[in-house]
Image: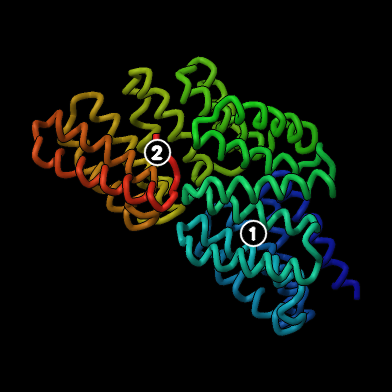
């Protein structure tokens, strides 16, 4: 019995460290809890599944996806067998696996698991439980990633309503969906709607999580993005620098989130003509994402595209062209030829081809881009910038 309490205490303390962004301490405690649980309670005990799930969460948050997936799968198998298929723990594990697949760019699998999680939660808890909001929020993130903005916005608004009513308007979870809803507005260039939501999320998180939490880095990075998009470079730069500092300290220099900030700061320097400062940041972002996410993830294409723009701006066209080509290959495979990000890279590549006097190839791709936009608009796809 004492060891059972020790397992719970270790997991609870680890959750606290995890929430505070202290990943190394959390990981060590989760590992200890798992080892004790397997030894004392057995390999197929529900408490063992909890430890497996928690350890997988810390690996996922550190970008160690290959370590996380088998732990989630084992936890799911145990819970389905021990607790039955209609249990909140099973729904949570579906949700966690879906998030993992989303981070890896495996969107079809992610959507399937989110839908399974949502169905299970609604059957067990009803439609207004806070856990429903988690699932709605995450499914909204998936749709946003795929540029399905109307679907994403509806899910975020529903999640926001649930959390505000169930947890309160100043709860840390409420800030999650505020931040994500702001990102949907940002993606559609609706900056005036995005900024106050980011500011509100920042205030809530500073009060509830402290100024050094990884979530603070996220919202600072996002505010930097909307300022950069509006050419407010002096306002954007210190936000990116602060976000980078927070993420490097709390998540580590090799985390996927750290690469986001490196990438965005590099883009900022390219826009300002500070090419020597931009290149090492963009190269480092690419290296981090290649290790953390794999060679076919859309973020790799983002990084390649930005490096291509850097070399293009410097007149290094021969270095730029293969980067655009590689980025297009990744995006067409991962998110599809009709996705706005794919078309933006294609348009940049067309400009480059014209600069290289490759007019025939440029005209061919321009025709392709117009046809893709027209076809997707008829299917009520996302608007294009």
Q: Residue at x 84, y 46 (%)?
A: 165
* Mark 2 lies on residue: 384
Q: Quadrant of the C terminus?
A: top left
How far separated are the C-alphas under marks 1 and 2? 35 Å
Name the outermost residue toward the front: 378
* Residue 350 in the figure: left or right of residue 3: left
Viewer-proximal residue among 31 and 211: 211
Q: Residue at x 46, y 62 (%)?
A: 106
Task: Quadrant for residue 31, please give it.
Answer: bottom right
Mark 1 or mark 2, whichever is nearer to me: 2
Q: How many marks?
A: 2
Q: Residues within 10 Å of mark 1 (few under 14, many from 20)?
A: many
Residue 304 % position (x, y): 32, 41
Secondary structure under tag 2 reads: loop
Viewer-proximal residue among 327 and 265: 327
Q: Residues within 10 Å of mark 2 (few under 14, many from 20)?
A: few
Q: Is residue 309 above or below residue 152?
A: above
Secondary structure under tag 1 reads: helix
Q: Is residue 255 visible?
A: no
Residue 83 % position (x, y): 77, 80
* Mark 1 lies on residue: 57
Q: Residue at x 58, y 49 (%)?
A: 152
Residue 281 % position (x, y): 40, 32
Name the outermost residue toward the top: 234
* Residue 110 in the figure: left or right of residue 268: right
* Residue 6 in the figure: left or right of residue 324: right
Q: Residue at x 38, y 50 (%)?
A: 378
């Amino acid at each position: 019995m004492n060891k059972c309490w020790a397992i719970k205490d270790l997991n609870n303390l680890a959750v606290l460290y995890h929430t505070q962004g202290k990943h190394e301490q959390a990981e060590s405690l989760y590992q200890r809890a798992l080892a004790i649980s397997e030894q004392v309670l057995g390999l197929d005990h529900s408490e063992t599944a909890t430890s497996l799930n928690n350890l997988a969460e810390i690996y996922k948050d550190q970008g160690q996806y290959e370590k996380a997936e088998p732990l989630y799968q084992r936890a799911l198998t145990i819970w389905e067998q021990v607790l039955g298929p209609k249990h909140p723990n099973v729904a949570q594990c579906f949700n966690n696996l879906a998030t993992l697949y989303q981070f890896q760019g495996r969107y079809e699998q992610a959507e399937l698991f989110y839908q399974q999680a949502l169905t299970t939660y609604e059957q067990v808890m009803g439609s207004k439980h806070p856990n429903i909001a988690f699932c709605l929020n995450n499914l909204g993130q998936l749709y946003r990633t795929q540029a399905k903005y109307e679907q994403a916005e509806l899910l975020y608004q529903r999640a926001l309503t649930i959390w505000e009513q169930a947890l309160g308007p100043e709860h840390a979870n409420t800030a999650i969906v505020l931040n994500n809803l702001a990102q949907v507005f940002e993606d559609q260039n609706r900056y005036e709607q995005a900024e106050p939501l980011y500011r509100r999320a920042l205030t809530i998180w500073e009060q509830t999580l402290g100024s050094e939490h990884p979530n603070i880095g996220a919202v600072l990075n996002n505010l930097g993005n909307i300022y950069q998009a509006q050419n407010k470079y002096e306002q954007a730069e210190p936000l990116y620098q602060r976000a980078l500092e927070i993420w490097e300290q709390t998540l580590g220099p090799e985390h996927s989130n750290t690469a986001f900030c490196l990438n965005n700061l590099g883009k900022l320097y390219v826009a300002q003509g500070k090419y020597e400062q931009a290149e090492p940041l963009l190269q480092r972002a690419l290296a981090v994402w290649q290790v953390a996410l794999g060679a076919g993830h859309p973020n790799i294409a983002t990084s390649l595209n930005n490096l291509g723009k850097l070399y293009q701006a410097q007149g290094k066209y021969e270095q730029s062209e293969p980067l655009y080509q590689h980025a297009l290959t990744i995006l067409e495979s991962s998110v599809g030829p009709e996705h706005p990000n794919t078309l933006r890279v294609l348009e940049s590549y067309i400009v480059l081809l014209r600069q290289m006097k490759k007019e025939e190839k440029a005209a061919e791709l321009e025709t392709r881009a117009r046809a893709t936009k027209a076809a997707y608009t008829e299917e009520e796809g996302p608007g294009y910038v």
